[in-house]
Structure formats: structure tokens, C-alpha cells
Amino acid sequence: MSTATQGTVNTQAEASVEEVEGKQQSRLAALWMQHYDLVILPLIIVLVLGLLLLYVGSRDLDTIEERVLAADNVGGLLVQHIWLAAISTVLVLVIAVPLGIVLSRRGARRAQGPVLAIGGFAQALPPFGVLLLMAFWLNFGFWTAVIGLTLAALLPVLRNTVVGLQQVDQSLIEAARGMGMTSRQTLFRVEIPLAVPVIVAGLRVALVLNVGTATLASYIGAGGLGELVQQALRLNRINVLLVAGGVIAALALLIDWLAGVAERVVVARSG
């Protein structure tokens, strides 16, 4: 092989390598632009918790603050808070998704507007007032708070279920029916799988909403991290208040991050 031919081959090989590297870099850049928030959010959570630890460690806490901020006390309230948000979100999913499916059917279109309007009105009510009314109507305690949180977070999942099912391409539904599928089979094999990303987005909103609203549940004796806020206000301890706010914010960010990861996975699989 001549020197000129060898040089041409080397040049072509180098160009191919550069092209492959360029495509890899472009792919990584596109991946970063799509999912950079999933990397930044955990860093923010770690930063918030780290600043809290540094702040608490640099302060001279009295015996009351040490007792309130003890790991077993904060951990127990954190578990209660997570249970409140988790159970109410599961109830929202169990109630709102089937109801949204029913409202998206052709025979129930007339009821769709009034039901969504009632849901919007319920969400517009102050959560604290709703919880207090529920407590006086039913009873103070954990399950009353769960019912109140469920009612407050129904609308995002209900609305997204209806919207997700209605935006399914009608030609796909007709094609499924043309293949011999029944209405039930079309719903479960075509419509719901295509609507899942929209439903999951509504569930993410409801979950984060419940995590924040669950802070108010402590005022009706349901426990949760709101107890830390109440203790800080009653005892006039600013250190406890800062820690309570930081932990609640970090928990909300963590839940939002986990829900975001789940949403991306669902969208990727359905896509």
C-alpha cells in the first residue's frame, strides 16, 4: 500500500472517530438537558440538610431544644408525616383514576364539567379550614387528616386522568376496534397505557401537595412534622423552627425528585 493511500485511510479513520465522539457528546448533552434537574435536586437536598446540621452544631442548644430535636423524636414525626402523605395519595389514586375513567366515557360527558367544577372548588378551599371542619365533623386524629388530605389532592389526578384519556388519538381507538377489540379491551390495552404519563404527572402533583399539606395535620392531632413547628412556636425556639422548616422542605424536594424519576421511567417505557 502506498504512502498516499495509507494517509487517506488514516484520515478517514480519524474522521470517523471524531464523528462518533461528536455524536456521543451530542447525545450526552441532550441527555443532560432532559434530565439535569434529576441531578441538581438531590444536590440541593444534601446542601439544605448539610447547612441545617452545620447550623445546629454551631449553636448552644438548651435542654428543651435538645429534647425536641432528638433523633428519635424527629424520626418518629417524620415517619408519621410520610404515612399521612402516602396513605392519602394511595386513596387519591384509588378514587380519582376510576372516577376519571368513568367521566371520560361518552355516556358520562355531561357529568364531567360539574364534577371537575366541584373538585376545583374543593381544592380552592384553604386546607387548614378543611382539616378543622373535618375534625369537628368526624373526630380529631390520624384518619380524619387522611380523609382531608385525600379530598384536597383529588383534583390533579382526576383532571389529568380525564385529559389523558381524552387526548388519545381517535384513529388509534378506531384501529383497535377494527382489530376486533371490545370497548373494555381498547380501554385497558390502548387508552390507559397512552394516558399513563399524564396520569402520573397529576399523581406527582398530588403527592407533593400532600407532603406539604400534611404539615397542618398536627393541628388536629394527627402528628407529623407539623408537631415540630407547633413545639417551636409554643416554646419560642427559633432553632427548632428552622430545623422543622428545613426538614419539611427537604422531604418535599425528595418526594418530588422520586416522583420525577418515576414519571421519567413511565414516560420512557410508554414512549
Image (tube, grey):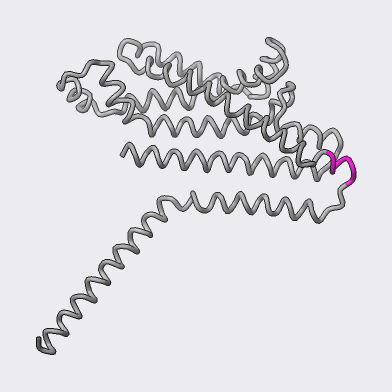
Residue at image coords 20%, 23%: 176
Q: Say whether residue 243 is left or right of residue 188.
A: right
Q: Main secondary structure of the magenta part?
A: helix
Residue at image coords 28%, 25%: 189
Identify the image quadrant of residue 160: top left
Q: Position of residue 245 (x, y in %)?
A: 71, 41
Residue 95 included in the magenta stretch of the image: no
Residue at image coords 50%, 19%: 119
The quadrant the N terminus occupies is bottom left
Q: Position of residue 157 (x, y in %)?
A: 46, 26
Q: Which portion, as a residue range, is magenta?
A: 62-67
Q: State how many labels appear.
A: 0
Residue that sits furthest to the front in the current view: 1
Q: Say whether residue 232 is left or right of residue 201.
A: right
Q: Say whether residue 168 is left or right of residue 215.
A: left
Q: Position of residue 246 (x, y in %)?
A: 69, 44
Residue that sits furthest to the bottom in the current view: 3
In terms of depth relative to the viewer, which is nearer, 140 or 213?
Answer: 140
Q: Position of residue 171 (x, y in %)?
A: 19, 27
Q: Say whether residue 92 is left or right of residue 238.
A: left
